[in-house]
Image: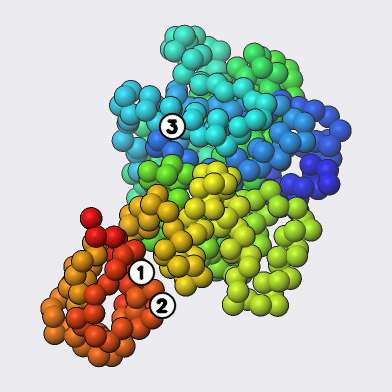
């Protein structure tokens, strides 16, 4: 499959300045993609773009990956209804290190150049920037931007000169990378189209040269119609300290049936044949959720490594009754203990229930046993004074789990 065919099939085609997208199949280009250090980690929204970048690289195009140390000092105002709170230099430095580390992890073994736009902006004086960049931008065009109109229109919160100038900063990034790295295309999400056009226009006006943009549509949750990538706890992060690998795996395991195949095309490297096979299996036996299970494993393996993916799969299988808790090693038990209430063995069942917070009183605990609402390792227990040896998985009702560790 050619790159243009791959991008089209996987759903990575939105707006582009290319008149013929098959140009990507015959001409090798140098392109760039950037992430601002607004946090120490990327989200799965960023990861969708990273997967698209992966396909460009795998088809022989050269990648320049940018950490926005300069743009991060201002913050992209597009899509924001209020002025951003400026981050401290220390926050930005910490966030840059986190994003750069994730670039290296996601694209390990791939050929790319890592750059930070602060490295060239720290050398540019204000008057120099106005003469070389600002002179080429029309205020009329900048004011016509949709997010600017919303911010300065009736009921808007207003916009600072700093945020208003963000588009010029990003435009200069493209010009600098064109001059110094031979970059002729920026790839971005649909929400970055306006900022990206600034670079195309600037290169045309200053260098008399042609540059292009390739944008991908934002990933939409097909079940809700809203932007994809939020869990009950909020954003789904790639950093394991911000979203644990277990919660990360569970997020993908629980995606909606209507969108799961689309998510597989975007977020995995599975082939067309493999995905079509999973689609057929899921359609024939939807209750088995074959597509969700494979999606959860593949994405977790890409982000956290195959060994970690196997581990969280085993932990997940314990909760769903597909594996015994005794099959888990100590590290996996620690992972499980981080996600569900935990108690030490050595007490009777009623005390265990109280310790786990599954009952507020002994009488409530006794009622749960009487109603057959408590099971240990898949077997219902009815005797309140029955002892429980660890490791064991206690389940109350349908969805409340607790872990009993070995008596220390």
The Cα–Cα distance between marks 1 and 3, rounded to whole angstroms, is 36 Å
Badge 2 element: loop
For the residues bearing labels 1 and 2, Cβ distance under 8 angstroms: yes
Residue labelled with disc 3: 98
Say the numbered circle drawn on residue 393: 1
Neighbourhood count class around disc 2 (C-alpha, 10 Å): few under 14, some 14–19, many 20 upward: some
1 or 3: tag closer to the N-terminus: 3
Q: Nearer the viewer, residue 8 or 345?
A: 345
Residue 77 at what x, y percent from top left? 43, 38
Q: What residue do we see at 24% from left, 75% from top?
A: 387
Say the numbered circle drawn on residue 378: 2
Q: Nearer the viewer, residue 221 or 193?
A: 221
Neighbourhood count class around disc 3 (C-alpha, 10 Å): few under 14, some 14–19, many 20 upward: some
Residue 9 at what x, y percent from top left? 76, 53
Vertical side of 240 occupied by 225: above or below = below
Neighbourhood count class around disc 1 (C-alpha, 10 Å): few under 14, some 14–19, many 20 upward: many
2 or 3: tag closer to the N-terminus: 3
Vertical side of 171 occupied by 338: above or below = below
For the residues bearing labels 2 and 3, Cβ distance under 8 angstroms: no
Depth-wise, is mark 1 or mark 3 nearer the camera? Answer: 1
Badge 3 element: helix
Identify the image quadrant of the C terminus: bottom left
């Amino acid at each position: 499959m050619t790159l243009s065919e791959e991008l089209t099939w996987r759903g990575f085609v939105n707006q582009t300045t290319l008149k013929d997208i098959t140009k990507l199949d015959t001409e090798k280009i140098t392109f760039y993609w950037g992430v601002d250090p607004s946090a120490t980690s990327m989200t799965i929204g960023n990861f969708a773009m990273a997967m698209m970048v992966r396909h460009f690289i795998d088809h022989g195009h050269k990648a320049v990956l940018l950490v926005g140390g300069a743009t991060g000092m201002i913050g992209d105002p597009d899509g924001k209804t209020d002025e951003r709170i400026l981050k401290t230099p220390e926050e930005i430095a910490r966030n840059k290190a986190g994003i750069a580390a994730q670039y290296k992890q996601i694209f390990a073994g791939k050929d790319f150049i890592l750059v930070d736009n602060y490295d060239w902006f720290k050398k540019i004086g204000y008057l120099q920037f106005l003469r070389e960049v600002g002179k080429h931008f029309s205020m009329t065009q900048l004011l016509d931007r949709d997010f600017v109109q919303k911010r300065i229109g009736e009921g808007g919160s207003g916009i600072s000169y700093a945020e208003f100038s963000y588009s010029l900063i990003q435009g200069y990034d493209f010009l600098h990378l064109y001059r110094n790295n031979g970059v002729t295309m920026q790839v971005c999400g649909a929400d970055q189209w306006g900022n990206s056009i600034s670079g195309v226009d600037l290169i045309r006006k200053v260098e008399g040269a042609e540059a292009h943009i390739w944008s991908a549509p934002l990933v939409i949750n097909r079940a809700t119609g809203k932007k994809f990538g939020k869990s009950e706890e909020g954003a789904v992060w790639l950093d394991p300290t911000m979203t644990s690998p277990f919660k990360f795996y569970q997020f993908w395991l629980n995606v909606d049936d209507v969108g799961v195949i689309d998510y597989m095309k975007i977020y995995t490297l599975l082939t067309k044949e493999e995905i079509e096979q999973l689609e057929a299996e899921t359609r024939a036996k939807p209750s088995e959720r074959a597509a969700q299970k494979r999606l959860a494993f593949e994405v977790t393996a890409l982000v956290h490594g195959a060994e970690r993916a196997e581990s969280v799969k085993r932990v997940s299988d314990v909760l769903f009754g597909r594996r015994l808790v005794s099959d888990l090693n100590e590290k996996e038990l620690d992972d499980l203990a981080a996600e569900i209430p935990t108690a030490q063995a050595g007490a009777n069942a009623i005390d265990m229930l109280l310790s786990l917070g599954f009952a507020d009183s002994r009488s409530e605990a006794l009622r749960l046993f009487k109603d057959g609402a408590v099971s240990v390792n898949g077997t219902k227990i009815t005797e309140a004074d029955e002892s429980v040896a660890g490791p064991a998985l206690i389940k109350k009702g349908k969805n409340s789990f607790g872990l009993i560790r070995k008596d220390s």
